[in-house]
Amino acid sequence: MEKNVDPELEFDQRLDYIRRIHRASIDIAEGEKVLRAICEAISLEIKSPPNPDRVYARSSCTDHMLSIEIYAQDIPSLRAALNSYLYLLHTAIRSLEMLANR
């Protein structure tokens, strides 16, 4: 039985509430302009994940680094979320490269 998680809870409260035990992280180092665009692109996905009862993610952006932490209840959910975020990042980077080469 899955628990419904209140999206208004703070990150640490949500982790405690659903007792997530599996974690992955993605770190990307890039230039400031590229990272700003990627952070904006990924922020909507981070704010409303497809299945908040099973997966939760948070991101942080600095001038030269994007970090994404993904927490999941089980390995298949972690793998699915990791694949989704990697594909989204890949698409954003490729789009920016195509725009730069115009």
Image: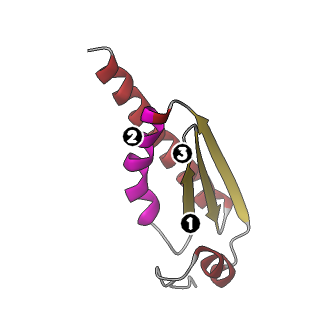
Which residue is rendered at x = 33% and y = 19% of the image? 100
| Front one among 2 and 90 | 90
* Mark closest to the chain's N terminus, 3 or 1: 1
Name the quadrant containing residue 92. top left
Q: Magenta part mainly helix, strand or loop? A: helix
Quadrant placement of the N terminus: bottom right
Question: Is 36 rendered above or below residue 18?
Answer: above
Residue assigned mark 1: 55
Q: Is residue 58 above or below residue 40?
A: below
**Disc 3 versus disc 2: nearer the observer:** 2
Within 10 Å of the Cα at label 2, are there few (<14), some (14-19), or many (20+) other Cα atoms?
A: few
Q: Residue at x 38, y 22 (%)?
A: 97
Q: Let me know if residue 40 is in the magenta part.
A: yes
**Amino acid at circle 1:** Val
Q: Of all residues shown, which one is farthest toward the right?
A: 21
Could you tell me the amino acid type at mark 2? Ala
User: What range is drawn magenta here?
Assistant: 33-50
Q: Quadrant of the C terminus?
A: top left
Label 2 sits on a secondary structure element that is helix
Q: Which residue appears at 66% of the width and 50% of the height? A: 25
Q: Would you name the residue on which mark 2 appears?
A: 37
Cα–Cα span, label 3 and label 2:
20 Å
| Residue denoted by label 3 | 83
Q: Earlier in the sequence, mark 2 or mark 1?
A: 2
- Location of residue 36 in the rendering, given as x and y in whole percent from the top left corner: 43, 42
Residue 45 in the figure: left or right of residue 14: left
